[in-house]
Amino acid sequence: MEYDFRRYHIRSINAANDAERAAINQELKDLYASLSEADKAEFNQQLQTFLAKEMGRIKSDYESVKGGL
């Protein structure tokens, strides 16, 4: 199964308030809790990959902006 962490991430960024952001986080927690142990391992692997890519992208964006100043 492929998990769309980007969709949750974008929704969280665009949340109107902390309560909405908390509800989005709870959706992810509920999804995780519903998974089998094998699916939890796959979820964790995909989440780690997503986070590493996002951190790399943010670092690249930051360095690009920093270099332009």
Image: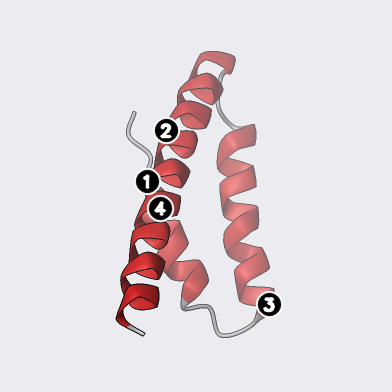
In terms of image quadrants, where is residue 3? top left
Residue 63, position as x, y percentages in the image: 37, 66
Pinpoint residue 20: horizontal percent, then vertical percent.
61, 74
Q: Tell whether 29 sits left or right of 12.
A: right
**Element class at badge 3:** helix
Out of 6 and 57, give the one closest to the viewer.
57
Colour mapping used in the image? secondary structure
- Report the quarter where the N terminus lies: top left
Q: Secondary structure at mark 4?
A: helix
Dot in front, 3 or 4 = 4
Question: Rounded to the nearest whole Å, what is the CA distance between mark 4 and mark 2?
Answer: 12 Å
- The residue lying at 37 percent from left, 46 percent from top is 53
Label 1 near label 4: C-beta < 8 Å? Answer: yes
Q: Residue at x 40, y 75 (%)?
A: 66
Which tag is nearer the camera, tag 3 or tag 2? Answer: 2
Residue 46's mark?
2
Marks 3 and 4, how far apart at CA: 22 Å
Tag 1: amino acid: Lys
Rate crowding at label 3 as few (under 14), some (14 to 19) or many (20 or more) other CA atoms within 10 Å.
few
Q: Earlier in the sequence, mark 1 or mark 2?
A: 2
Left or right of 39, for residue 24: right
* Mark 1 in CB contact with mark 3 (< 8 angstroms): no
Q: Quickly name the residue at label 4.
A: 54
Q: Secondary structure at mark 1?
A: helix
Q: CA distance from mark 1 to mark 3?
A: 25 Å
- Classify mark 1: residues with Cα within 10 Å, few (<14), some (14-19) or many (20+): few
Q: Which residue is mark 1?
A: 53
